[in-house]
């Protein structure tokens, strides 16, 4: 979120000023209101997707805003000066983005190291891609899923959007200059941009596979750039510098009606659709982009009623700080969420973190973003120090520092208390326990008064040698049963693990000399991953190792593709077998917790029996 979240220079329109083609780019308060609605939708979605299942469409609204505003800014500069200063443009983008981003990365990483050290490794892995604005492709390469949610979210998962926008900011000005140099007619420019947007839509439709996690087409710049391009086409067609405030209200009424309709479409989609609906790819996202365009067009009308409504002071206040809100909200939510829980499982914590993000964004806007944008990085400290030396400035500076100190202390104390409360019930020996959700409700007893179980596989001795198990939250829940069933097994399981990390985990165990003769991989619950990751894990283990691949049972689009990948890998390797947990538990939902994914104690025994049965395929 960069210029989509940036308030343009405030030059209010004068209703008596005659129209001139070279008029300075005006401030459009309605766009700030639209930003506020978009960032609110995204924050609510991250707090609890069940409250607003399509809240992620707020990102597409931001994309449309970014494409419109950046193009409008470039056109205004060319209209006023006759040229576009690319170096100055990119420098302004850096001043706008980097300072606030750097503060968030440093503070969130340092806080995680103190209060949530388990989550630090995933955050550190993504830092380079975040800093180089390639995070969306890094997440794609590592088979990360934006939509899987069985534990605290990654701290910087949301910054993929910043990467898409920065890639657009780098390339689009060059493309626009080439386009204007080759063809002078504005209509041709608009048509060319719309053709590029259509190609992106087709790419999304072509690459999307029903039943497979859609994160690749969601993260990809190639497949998700069309909202930015449609916004750019609107700016080419209707730049804000050409707005005429003297039009009578009836003349903008059709645009107002279209804007209200677009806003209604976006609200309906946000409330009723989710990422698992096939209609979203690309049809739903294309409709959202067009609806955003209608709202944008209405928002920039000087006398439009929708523009007046969106331009009210509270929405403007949130809108101009929405970049900071977007940056801060997910790291705070992730840090406030207890281990082995999702933000939806701890709504009080998540809501408190979301509210805190507004306060931190306000501080960032006042003390980081605004000074650097106005005076530049080198000169930002000069006015700040001059302000601090005055009497009033000293009081303001003292109050600010005191507030920051108290706020940080309170936040750290709150998170530390939650972290202590979450871990205090764990045994000192480090035994893994079933996630809290596994004990959410009591299960009805079987007619005989005994615990219901699935048919247990026949008992066979396990192969000799050490056994290492690598898994996600499902294996966390099954760990006690695995250790009872297979004495001596070493279990390395964590919440929210992706299948894509299997090769690196195997390498680490082998490097430390703790990799067993038999390796059990129970990953695939939390998102995409397939043959590449599995083959990488097998190759990383070296010769002579045996592998058991545990299928996933999760009501998500990627279940079948992950399980099929396990079957295919096993068919090509004599030292690989499949433990079909999905088949064993299907039809026995009474052995799962309320989320329908994690086994309860009885289900954990079925999990362990299924793994033990698969181990018998190997000679002793």
Image (cartoon, helix red, strand yellow):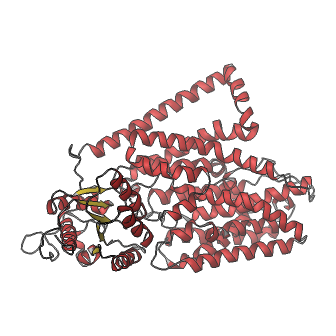
Q: Is residue 469 left or right of residue 29?
A: left
Q: Nearer the viewer, residue 605 or 53?
A: 605
Residue 39 in the image, given as x and y percentages of width and height: 58, 56
Tell me: residue 539, above or below residue 509: below
Q: Which quadrant is home to the N terminus?
A: bottom right
Q: Is residue 559 left or right of residue 137?
A: left
Q: Is residue 93 left or right of residue 13?
A: left
Point 49% across, 51% down: residue: 125
Work out whether residue 55 can be spotted: no
On the image, which quarter does residue 178 sit in? Answer: bottom right
Residue 570 in the image, given as x and y percentages of width and height: 33, 76
Residue 354 in the image, given as x and y percentages of width and height: 49, 49
Q: Which quadrant is home to the C terminus?
A: bottom left
Q: Nearer the viewer, residue 257 or 11?
A: 11
Work out whether residue 141 can be spotted: yes
Point 72% across, 41% down: residue: 373
Tell me: residue 119, above or below residue 146: above
Q: Which residue is at the far left?
A: 448
């Amino acid at each position: 979120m960069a210029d989509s979240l940036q308030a343009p220079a405030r030059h209010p329109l004068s209703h008596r000023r005659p129209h001139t083609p070279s008029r300075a780019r005006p401030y459009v308060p309605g766009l700030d209101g639209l930003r506020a609605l978009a960032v609110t939708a995204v924050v609510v979605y991250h707090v609890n997707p069940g409250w607003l299942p399509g809240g992620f469409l707020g990102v597409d609204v931001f994309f449309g805003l970014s494409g419109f505003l950046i193009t409008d800014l470039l056109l205004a500069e060319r209209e006023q000066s006759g040229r576009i200063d690319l170096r100055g443009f990119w420098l302004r983008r850096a001043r706008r983005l980097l300072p606030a981003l750097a503060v968030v990365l440093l503070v969130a990483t340092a806080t995680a190291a103190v209060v949530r050290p388990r989550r630090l490794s995933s955050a550190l892995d993504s830092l380079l891609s975040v800093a180089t604005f390639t995070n969306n492709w890094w997440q794609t390469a590592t088979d990360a899923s934006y939509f899987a949610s069985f534990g605290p979210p990654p701290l910087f998962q949301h910054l993929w959007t910043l990467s898409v926008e920065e890639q657009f900011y780098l390339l689009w000005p060059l493309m626009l200059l080439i386009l204007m140099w080759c063809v002078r007619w504005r209509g041709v420019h608009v048509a060319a941009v719309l053709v590029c947007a259509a190609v992106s839509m087709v790419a999304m439709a072509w690459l999307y596979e029903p039943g497979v996690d859609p994160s690749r087409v969601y993260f990809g710049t190639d497949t998700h750039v069309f909202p930015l391009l449609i916004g750019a086409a609107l700016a080419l067609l209707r730049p804000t510098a050409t707005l005429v405030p003297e039009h009578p209200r009836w003349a903008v009424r059709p645009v107002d009606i279209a804007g209200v309709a677009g806003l209604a479409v976006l609200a309906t989609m946000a409330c009723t659709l989710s990422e698992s609906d096939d209609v979203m790819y690309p049809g739903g996202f294309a409709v959202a982009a067009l609806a955003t365009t209608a709202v944008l067009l209405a928002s920039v009308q000087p006398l439009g009623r929708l523009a007046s409504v969106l331009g009210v002071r509270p929405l403007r206040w949130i809108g101009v700080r929405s970049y900071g809100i977007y940056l801060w909200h997910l790291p705070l939510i992730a840090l406030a969420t207890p281990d082995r829980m999702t933000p939806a499982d701890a709504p009080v914590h998540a809501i408190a973190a979301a509210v805190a993000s507004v306060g931190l964004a306000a501080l960032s806007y006042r003390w980081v973003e605004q000074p650097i944008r106005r005076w530049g990085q080198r000169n930002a400290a000069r006015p700040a120090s001059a302000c601090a030396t005055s009497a009033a400035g000293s009081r303001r500076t003292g109050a600010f520092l005191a507030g920051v100190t108290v706020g940080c202390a309170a936040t750290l104390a709150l998170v530390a208390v939650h972290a202590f409360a979450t871990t205090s019930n764990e045994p000192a020996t480090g035994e893994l326990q079933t996630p809290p959700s596994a004990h959410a409700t009591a299960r009805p007893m079987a007619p005989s008064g005994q615990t219901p179980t699935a048919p247990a596989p026949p008992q066979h001795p396990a192969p000799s040698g050490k056994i290492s198990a690598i898994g996600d939250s499902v294996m966390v829940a099954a760990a006690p049963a695995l250790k009872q069933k297979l004495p001596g097994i070493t279990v390395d399981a964590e919440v929210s693990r992706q299948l894509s990390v299997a090769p690196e985990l195997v390498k680490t165990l082998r490097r430390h000399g703790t990799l067993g003769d038999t390796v059990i991989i129970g990953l695939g619950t939390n998102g995409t991953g397939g043959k590449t990751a599995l083959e990488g894990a097998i190759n990383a283990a070296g010769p002579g190792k045996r592998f058991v691949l545990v299928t996933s049972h999760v009501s998500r689009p990627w279940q079948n593709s992950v399980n099929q990948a396990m079957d295919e890998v096993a068919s090509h390797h004599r030292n690989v077998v499949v433990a079909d947990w999905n088949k064993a538990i299907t039809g026995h939902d009474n052995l799962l917790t309320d989320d329908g994914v994690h086994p309860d104690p009885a289900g954990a025994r079925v999990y362990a029996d299924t793994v033990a049965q698969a181990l018998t395929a190997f000679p002793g």
